[in-house]
Amino acid sequence: MPTLLGFDYGTSKIGIAVGQTISATATPLTTVRNRGQKPDWSRIAALIHDWQPDAAVLGLPYRMDDTEEDWSARVHRFRRQLEGRFGLTVHLVDERLTSIEAERDLIAAERAGALIVAGMRNRRDLGHGDPVDAYAAKLILEIWLNEQH
């Protein structure tokens, strides 16, 4: 069962999710804080070592007019670094509005008590730190998985 890691890259933190191609589903893992505007490569390396992904999916930020955001160059650099450091194939996905959707989904789940059912008291219990980025990585990964089927 091929495993994939999804990444929601940000200049201060990176959300990470894991998914499988057979089920075409993903699960938020964690949010990794950057160190001095650079990815925390030791944490990312540990996750890659633990999950042994076959590939990665990375969200690419677009504006509503279909042009890349000004800071997209950092995302492309992060992609090249993932490929170079870990030998991963990295697929890019339009991540437009995934963080907004992630926040809405988490708020709705918290209000409905769905997080309590999952063993969490609130949104902060999902992963480490702010769960919105990890959940956005889940959405990014699911977009790619759904495009493949």
Image (tube, grey):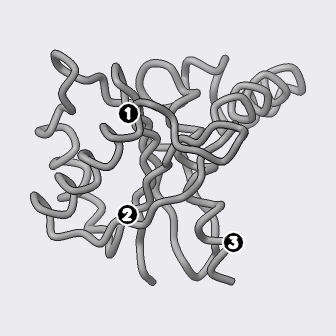
Q: CA distance from mark 3 to mark 2?
A: 15 Å
The 10 Å Cα crowd at callout 2, few under 14, some 14 to 19, many 20 or more, is: many
Q: Which residue is mark 2?
A: 56
Name the spot of residue 42 as percent of width and height, x first.
11, 38
Q: In this rendering, is residue 118 above or below 21?
A: above
> Which residue lies most toward the right here?
112
Residue type highlighted by circle 3: Asn
The 10 Å Cα crowd at callout 3, few under 14, some 14 to 19, many 20 or more, is: few
* Residue in the image at 59% along x and 53% along y: 94
* Residue in the image at 41% along x and 72% along y: 3
Name the spot of residue 24 as percent of width and height, x first.
63, 72
Residue type highlighted by circle 2: Ala
**Would you say 11 lies left or right of 97 here?**
left
Q: CA distance from mark 2 to mark 1?
A: 13 Å
Residue type highlighted by circle 1: Ile
Q: Which residue is mark 3?
A: 146
**Would you say 109 lies left or right of 21 here?**
right
Indicate which disc residue 14 carries. Answer: 1
